[in-house]
Image (tube, rainbow, N blue to C red):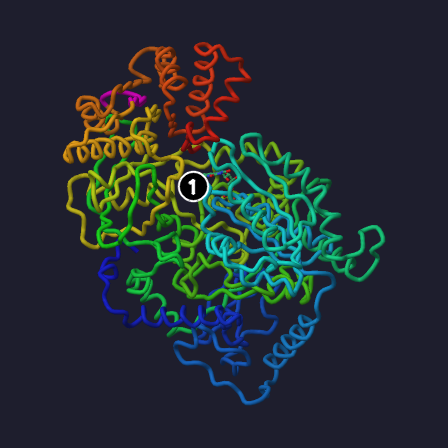
Amino acid sequence: MPAEGDSASGAPVVGGAAILARLRAQRAAAAAAGAPAPAPAPATSAPPPAANGNATPAAAAPVTEAAPPAQAPASPPAAKPAPATAAPAAAAAAAAPPPKPAGPPAATGGAAILARLRAQRTTKAAAPPPGKQLVVLYASQTGTAQEIAKNIQAEAESRGIRGQVASMNEFGFEHLNPEEAPVLVYVASSTGDGDAPDNSAKFYATLRRKSHPEDMLAGVAFTGFGLGDSNYTRYMYVPRSIKQRLLDLGAQQFYNPGEADEVDGIEQGLDKWLEGLWPALRAAVQLPSQDGAADGDVGDAAAASAGQAGAAADGDLKGVPPLPRCRVRVEWAAADAAAAVRAAEAAGPSAGELSARDPAGEYSAEAPFWAPVGAARYLTTELSDEDRQVLHMEVDLSGSGMQYAPGDSLGVLPQNDPALVDTLLARLELDGEAVFDVAPAEEAADGGGGAAAAAAAAPHQERLLPHLRAPCSVRAALTRGVDLTGPPRKSLLRLLGEHCAAPEERAALLRLCSRDGRDEYAAELALRPSLLDLLRRFPSCRPPLPALLDALPPLAARLYSLSCSPLECPGKAQVAFTVVRLTTPQYGTHHGVATSWLHRQLDAVARGAAPAAALRLPVFLRRGGAFGLPPDPATPLLMIGPGTGVTPFRGFLQHRRGAAAAAAGGGAGEPRGAAWLYFGCRREDQDYLYREDLEAFASDGTLDRLEVAFSRAQAHKVYVQHLMQQHATELHALIAKQGAHVYVCGDGTGMAKDVHACLAGILQSQGGLSEAEAAAQLQEMTRQGRYVRDIWS
Ligand SMILES: Cc1cc2nc3c(=O)[nH]c(=O)nc-3n(C[C@H](O)[C@H](O)[C@H](O)COP(=O)(O)O)c2cc1C
């Protein structure tokens, strides 16, 4: 952690850090060998029972908390740990591995009963489920594809089609084994500029390796669904690349992959695609069609479905999604191993973590560079509203070898607010200091699917919930692992509903996630409730920890456009961001996860304190792709970036000035195209971001034209598009005659749409195009990378 600085000094790995490194290495080695991650020895002592099943361990032995409370060990807590019968726990192994008995343990009483139950489960699990294996994989940055994939798996299971769901990285490309003839359904989005989401980057890179034999995936049947946004130049890049690669490697498509453009809304296209998926999937997994299927399998499924959907018993609600199966259980670490893990967490990143790189040898979201903070300052004045504070931050990249270009972004791995985590721990009655590891759930969450379903649920998973970096403390998991404040997905509401003791609370939550409750859900989402808000609103809700960890999306890295150029700021990366705060009457003030985390750390520096040597942030670079300077400096630039949308353009302009200076220094003046910048803010004396820099660019000739719209400086609002409209003739010449590259950066909900409409209007009024022709021209410019947008909502 950045603030816990001794750690960031690259000190030798000793004590807790060394133990943690060993534990993780053991897991990695086991995973690499294709073996399941070492599981702790099952203990006969259950954690002290708590109402919500969230008991934490008191005993020294590792204990298992099964997913939902119904699955808590049936035997009463034993006074002493029983001998281990399974592979030693990763956590326990590092401490004092329990002795392995030579033969079956001669357990008696509760221990014997539990051992028998486990043996029965193992025997049952060995029976292969009927039909082929369904594997639902997702590549998801902000959780939408993950939600869809989880729903597909849950719905498939309720239809008697058994299988597993995992992120692509959790599953691992190596486990896509054609000999097992799996049926693959993927749901994928893109991030950055056609980049793979973090939880799929490793799988995606391996899939795209050129060295694979052509028939490598012959025998794999697949379909998939792509999510994209046609505002991006590389529209649907990742889903389409996945499809193409699967075909290239001999996999066979059993149903046409679908796509949904976020611009038109996802639901309609998805619903239509899903309608056709079910019969095709049933045939692909070689189960009899539903009509004629009066076999045991369907019976099981019906039971599972009834147990899961539970909604059938909830009045006349339509379209309550099936309860996603909880894929994991937690295994509590022994006291000494737990202490070592906690010590390592407190020490911050280990030497191993500090020097880690991803498989391509780069820093990434999984292996960030811990960059010292160099400087911070407010770009807004004291007069600006509190909810519009903008901070500039500089980190030092020296020694990292990281190279960036203008238009690239800095990825930052944030952490949840410690106060929020404390409150959540108290509400869930969890001990934040308890340490656990993650293991595949042994049984279906509802008990309905049985052991065979559990076997199908996790036959191959490289590592479940890798974002938790388990073994870890509960506090660390909630602080760094999961997104606690993102908009609640329907599957989370479904889960919360399942664990409400009060019938009226359960009914309210099930309605919110049902098809009938679509409008209520949309209204609720607009209030941006966090998990904690919902737990406060539904006080009888007690979700168990494993189900919660499985349901919450990973805490994703946040990307900030670099506001500098390596030509003027060598070895440094600078960004600017608004400290996000949102207040609603229902749920009070919410703070953006990453920007409030950065703000807490940078405020003192921004107010004049020298940055502590220990203040380091985990960062990585993401390339900007089409959002970069054109290769030919003679190409004119039209940049439109109100608010913090101006940040990448400061980088562009520094680069342009640096390149010009270098060329002049070498005696070679180079022809430069015109550069125009439209910036907008509320008031000149409050939030004119990077004013000195922008005005300097205008005065030294780096910028040919600087236009600033002060929206609140007069009675009526003036925005960038209003100024653009005033300059329609010149802008048309710049775009249509001189071939300018047009860049738009900033708010996607209002500004980007209005600017788009303004550009289309200029093409019509000045170029004589029809509405359709203007739209087509902008589309063609997007395709050519001449009209590029980097927008956010
Ligand atoms: C930072 C960012 C970059 C994106 N880049 C692309 C892109 O290059 N191509 C595309 O088609 N969609 C892009 N999208 C749109 C996403 O694919 C779309 O929002 C999707 O629904 C997100 O799904 P997820 O929540 O599963 O990540 C991007 C979205 C964001 C927020």
Residue 630 image-quadrant placement: top left
The N terminus - image quarter: bottom left
Q: Residue furthest front?
A: 668
Residue 646 visible in the picture: yes
Residue at label 1? 192
Residue 501 visible in the picture: no
Residue 693 image-quadrant placement: top left
What residue is shown at x 60% (from left), y 47% (from top)?
Answer: 494
Amino acid on which the number 1 mark rests in the picture? Gly
**Toward the viewer: 774 or 720?**
774
Q: Is residue 399 left or right of residue 430?
A: left
Q: x, y percentage for residue 585? A: 45, 31
Task: Please tell me whether mark 1 sits on a helix, a strand or a loop.
Answer: loop
User: Mark 1 CB in 8 Å range of ligand 1?
Assistant: yes
Residue range in magenta is: 674-685
Q: x, y percentage for residue 736? A: 41, 18
Compared with residue 501, is residue 172 higher up or lower down, i.e. above or below?
below
Is 39 part of what is drawn in magenta?
Answer: no
Q: x, y percentage for residue 6? A: 22, 61
Compared with residue 776, is residue 345 higher up or lower down, i.e. above or below?
below
The C terminus - image quarter: top left
**Toward the viewer: 565 or 524?**
565
